[in-house]
Image: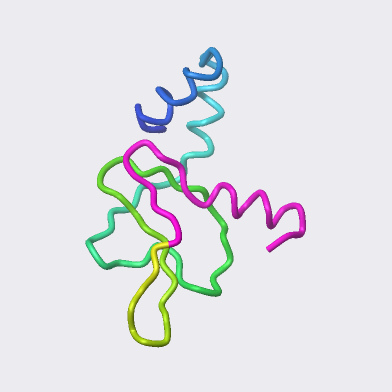
Amino acid sequence: MPSKALLSKLKGYFAVTHDLRTDINALAKKRINLDAGDALIRAGDKYKCMFLVEEGWLLRARYLPGGTRQIVNFWSRRAGCCAHAICRAARGRS
């Protein structure tokens, strides 16, 4: 079942019909919970899914040689992540 956050976001762009809700339900495969510090995707992993952040936030970081990290991107509540990377991969770009 898709989250209320996703449906709310979609309603900002177009009408969410019963058929669309049914299709989204078929796509929403599972929910996962991550603790602070857990990795959703590691460097070099292939993007296979799009994720919706329902609570908390995620970040994408580049770890530098000195041991520090540079935050490249972040996602907060109601934000979808990995969608852009999936679209780029589908077009043959990295």
How far across and down, in percent of the image, does residue 39 sit?
Answer: 36, 67
Does the segment drawn in magenta span residue 2?
Answer: no
Residue at point 33%, 78% (across, down): 68
Left or right of residue 36: residue 3: right
Percent position of residue 22, x then y: 52, 24
Residue occupying image coordinates x 58% and y 66%: 46
Q: Is residue 23 above or below residue 30?
A: above
Q: Nearer the viewer, residue 47 or 66?
A: 66
Which residue ends up furthest to the bottom in the rendered image? 66
Q: The N terminus is located in which quarter?
A: top left
Q: Which residues are magenta?
A: 72-94
Task: Looking at the picture, tell me which residue is in the foreground, 42 or 71.
Answer: 71
Q: Position of residue 66 (x, y in %)?
A: 36, 87
Q: Residue furthest right?
A: 92
Q: Is residue 80 above or below residue 60?
A: above
Q: How many marks?
A: 0
Query: What's the residue at 44%, 72% (across, down)?
Result: 62
